[in-house]
């Protein structure tokens, strides 16, 4: 008699268990509400010696666990908290662990561009895997090659679909809108953003002069005279690029100026400087929490769109083994 060939077996996991770090509690709560699932209980304790301790309230043995933790400021506290939570879940025999990282720290340290420097983005990827993550999920990495630093599977998503949908409605009220990429490094993504809005694009060219470490905006490639301008970048950190871009387009005759980014890092005095800029609106997302005091300084200038429905739906599809690409007709 012919031997029966066993069918290929796929691993199955238990229920979804959502855990939140302390880095982005509001976003985690919104994801929880989107999925209609509670956040699982855990204690995160900071001892007097600055050591962190994590304890789960209930067992997650065999469960499909998702840990939501951004790694923005305080970077090292949030990163260590993520790593400790991942190890805690691994030691409690979770069936599968996915690190959901709305914003990934050290993403700019993605290559050796001078002698005797680290590739810290690779180190962070290694630590996340070694700590216990089976998968990862993140949004708009600064450099695409960071995906190659992970040897575990993951979903690298973009929030530009959310920003594009919002701006597409807003552009109907604009006069001859033009998308401006804040620097040439963002040229390709900027072009895609402009194409989705059916708008022309211009570029800010920046160069370093002499011994000045900071690049200066020199010229604008494209025409913005008499047009409403949408300055776009993946993140606003110190706001240097946005400030230079806004001043440059204004000097070239732009009307209203809008700033758009995914990650509102807002380091140093960025918020104070943005509040003084002649910007009509700053449109961003909640991948990084913005303190209430900084929100008040920006007041009506600031619009924050939530990535919770996007991350929530991808979590659901990852659990059910369904395509994520179908969400974007890919």
Image: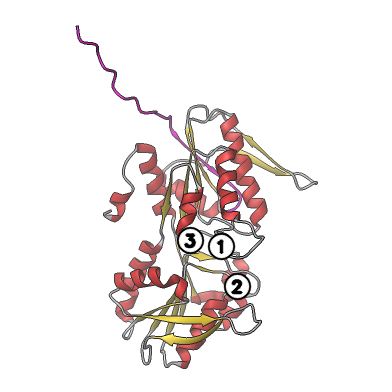
On the question of residue 260 being in view, the answer is no
Determine the CA span between mark 1 and mark 3.
7 Å
| Residue designated by label 2 | 238
Q: Residue at x 60, y 74 (%)?
A: 270
- State the predominant SS element of the stretch in magenta: loop
Which of the two discs, 1 and 3, labels the residue nearer the N terminus? 1
Quarter occupied by the N terminus: top left
Estimate the x, y position of residue 59 in percent, counting from the top left.
Answer: 56, 28
Q: Is residue 117 above or below residue 93?
A: below
Q: Are marks 1 and 3 in contact (CB under 8 Å)?
A: yes
* Helix, strand or loop under label 1: loop
- Res. 42 mark: none
Which of the two discs, 2 and 3, labels the residue nearer the N terminus? 3
Q: Which residues are magenta?
A: 1-24
Estimate the x, y position of residue 84 in percent, counting from the top left.
Answer: 63, 41
Q: Is residue 29 above or below residue 213?
A: above
Determine the CA span between mark 2 and mark 3.
18 Å
* Helix, strand or loop under label 3: loop
Neighbor class of circle 1 (other Cα within 10 Å; few <14, some 14-19, many 20+) is: some
Please give left or right for residue 177 compared with residue 297 in the image. Answer: left
Q: Residue at x 36, y 62 (%)?
A: 161
- Res. 143 mark: 3
Estimate the x, y position of residue 140 in percent, counting from the top left.
Answer: 45, 59
Neighbor class of circle 2 (other Cα within 10 Å; few <14, some 14-19, many 20+) is: some
């Amino acid at each position: 008699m012919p031997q029966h060939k066993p069918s290929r077996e796929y691993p199955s996991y238990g229920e979804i268990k959502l855990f939140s770090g302390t880095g982005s509690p509001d976003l985690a709560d919104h994801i929880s509400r989107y999925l209609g699932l509670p956040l699982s209980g855990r204690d995160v304790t900071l001892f007097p010696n600055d050591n962190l301790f994590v304890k789960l309230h209930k067992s997650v043995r065999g469960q499909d666990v998702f840990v939501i933790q951004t790694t923005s400021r305080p970077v090292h506290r949030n990163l260590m908290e993520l790593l400790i939570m991942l190890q805690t879940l691994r030691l409690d025999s979770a069936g599968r662990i996915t690190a959901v990282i709305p914003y990934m720290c050290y993403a700019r340290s993605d290559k050796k561009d001078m002698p005797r420097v680290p590739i810290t983005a690779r180190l962070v990827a290694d630590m996340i895997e070694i700590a216990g993550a089976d998968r990862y999920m993140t949004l708009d990495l600064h450099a695409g090659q960071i995906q190659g630093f992970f040897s575990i599977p993951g979903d690298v998503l973009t929030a530009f679909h959310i920003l594009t949908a919002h701006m597409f409605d807003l552009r109907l009220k604009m006069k001859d809108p033009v998308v401006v990429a804040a620097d040439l490094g963002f040229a390709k993504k900027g072009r895609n953003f402009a194409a989705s809005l059916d708008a022309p694009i211009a570029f800010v060219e920046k160069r370093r002069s002499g011994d000045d470490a900071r690049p200066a905006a020199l010229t604008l490639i494209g025409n913005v005279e008499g047009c409403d301008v949408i300055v776009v970048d993946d993140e606003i950190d110190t706001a240097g690029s946005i400030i230079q871009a806004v001043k440059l387009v204004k000097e070239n005759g732009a009307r209203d100026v809008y700033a758009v980014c995914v990650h509102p890092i807002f380091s140093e005095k960025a918020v104070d400087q943005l509040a003084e800029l002649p910007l009509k609106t700053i449109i961003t997302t909640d991948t990084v929490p913005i303190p209430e005091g900084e929100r008040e300084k920006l007041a009506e200038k600031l619009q924050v769109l939530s990535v919770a429905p996007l991350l929530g739906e991808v979590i659901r599809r990852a659990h059910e083994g369904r395509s994520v690409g179908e969400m974007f007709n890919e």
